[in-house]
Amino acid sequence: MTATIRPVKGTRDYYPEDMALRAWLYDQMRHVSELFGYQEYQAPILEPIGLYAAKSGDELVEKQSYVFEDRGGDRITLRPELTPSLARMVAQRQNQLAFPLRWWSFGPFWRYERPQKGRTREFFQWNIDLIGDPSPEAEAEIVAIAAAFFKQVGLRSDEVQIRVNDRRLLAKELESIGIPEQARTPLLGLIDRKDKLSPEAWILQTKDIGLANAQIDSLNELLANKELWRGSESLERFFQAIEAFGASEYVVFEPSIIRGLQYYTGTVFEAWDTAGEFRALFGGGRYDNLVSDVGGKPVEAVGFAVGDLVITLLLQSLGRLPELAKSPTDVFVTLFDVSLRDKSFAIMNALREAGIRVAGQLTSEKLGKQFKYADRIGAKLAVILGPDEAAKGKVGFKVLATGEQGECTESEMIAKVRQLLEA
Ligand code: HAM
């Protein structure tokens, strides 16, 4: 026997029930995007690797990207994220577009990471970005969208939290405690990993970067100071707008949020489950240089991306995933035998022409098996045509959940089916 060929490690097979869940998530994302007036767009799956080399950061480009040479010898990558493609699309039509752009997208991405809980090599992201508005209120709108999404999928503010920081504020504070410029970039990387380090490792590594004991103390104080944002004009305005947008219960200031991607220039944010059981639910921030980095004119931008995996795991662990229909079948039409086949098929056709979703038996089979199948695919109703019914110009029906049975004339069938489906 031939062994089943295994899928590529870390890729995803979407069986119909998985696909139904993905479609549900997509619907929630579309709903929230449109509530805020955002337009949907899509970018290619394949991009030149140089697009990311511009600014995404070494880890994403050198360690995590799927790169290959195409038949023409170009170095191509399966997109590991969307933001550089978005920047490229904006740069290409900068003179024609109506700024600020409010754009969203949903689609697959690939990163060569070690598959683990909440991380795979193929995943889906919802990206939503606001381009061409430099204000803190633009950042607040983007974060308010994230909060609206949490509300939409039924996640409460005691279950998830959006943690916001500003890289500019942190850079200023690091300067004020005397951290030299060349130490700041490695230190930001270290702060980004702080929660993965033991307190001892944290101290050792800050010393490796060249920090003195007093500086480490000041840094620890700084990172524990949840009031640090007060006095920053842009963060004050940000939090005021967040309040007015009705999102403040979900949003907190957190000075240790840095984010790994290099292109962020200002506000950065991540969402986490408050129980701390999962990885980040999403991440984003302001990236004012990316469009010019890929060849456009400078334009300010802010946005975020939510992966499909962690949010699904979290909703599942809270028992908050919706009950989704097993299949789109409302009615299953049975088949008695070959002599009644054409008549059964004509019934299927009449129901479909009336807009009712029908699956039907195509080959002879025991009636019991047909009912069992109808039940397994989640049909609500079976329409039965046997010789007795056919002789009387009637059809039988059975409500699968209750077992209730009856019959009606063929001409009454559509109205009867509609009435039973609505009940
Ligand atoms: P990111 O933090 O690299 O940001 O990814 C955003 C989200 O994508 C993560 O929080 C996570 O939910 C999901 N994600 C990333 N990698 C994986 C993986 N291997 N498996 C499962 N889920 C994953 C960005 O991608 C930025 N481009 C977001 C952005 C949009 N910034 C501005 N606009």
Image: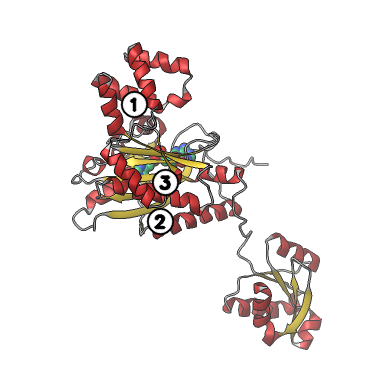
> Dot 2 lies on which element?
helix
Residue 101 vs 167, above or below: the answer is: below
Where is the C terminus found, in terms of image quarters? bottom right
Residue 179 vs 154, above or below: the answer is: above
Q: Earlier in the sequence, mark 3 or mark 1?
A: 1
Residue 336 vs 110, above or below: the answer is: below
Residue 233 vs 174, above or below: the answer is: below
Judge from the rendering whether residue 366 lies leftward or rightward of residue 33; answer left or right: right
Mark 1 to mark 2 CA distance (whole Å):
32 Å
Amino acid beneath label 3: Ser
Q: Which residue is mark 3?
A: 248
Where is the N terminus found, in terms of image quarters? top right
Q: Locate residue 346, reporting x and y percent.
A: 65, 80
> Dot 3 lies on which element?
helix
Query: What residue do we see at 64% from left, 77% from top?
Result: 418
- Is residue 277 at least partly visible in the picture? yes
Q: Which residue is mark 2?
A: 33
Judge from the rendering whether residue 293 lies leftward or rightward of residue 188; answer left or right: left
Q: Which residue is mark 1?
A: 188
Query: What residue do we see at 20% from left, 46% from top?
Result: 296
Closer to us: 369 or 206: 206
Q: Earlier in the sequence, mark 1 or mark 2?
A: 2
Amino acid beneath label 1: Leu
Within-10-Å neighbours for mark 1: few <14, some 14–19, many 20+: many
Amino acid beneath label 2: Ser
Closer to us: 7 or 376: 376
Within-10-Å neighbours for mark 3: few <14, some 14–19, many 20+: some
| Colouring of the image | secondary structure
Judge from the rendering whether residue 291 lies leftward or rightward of residue 27; answer left or right: left
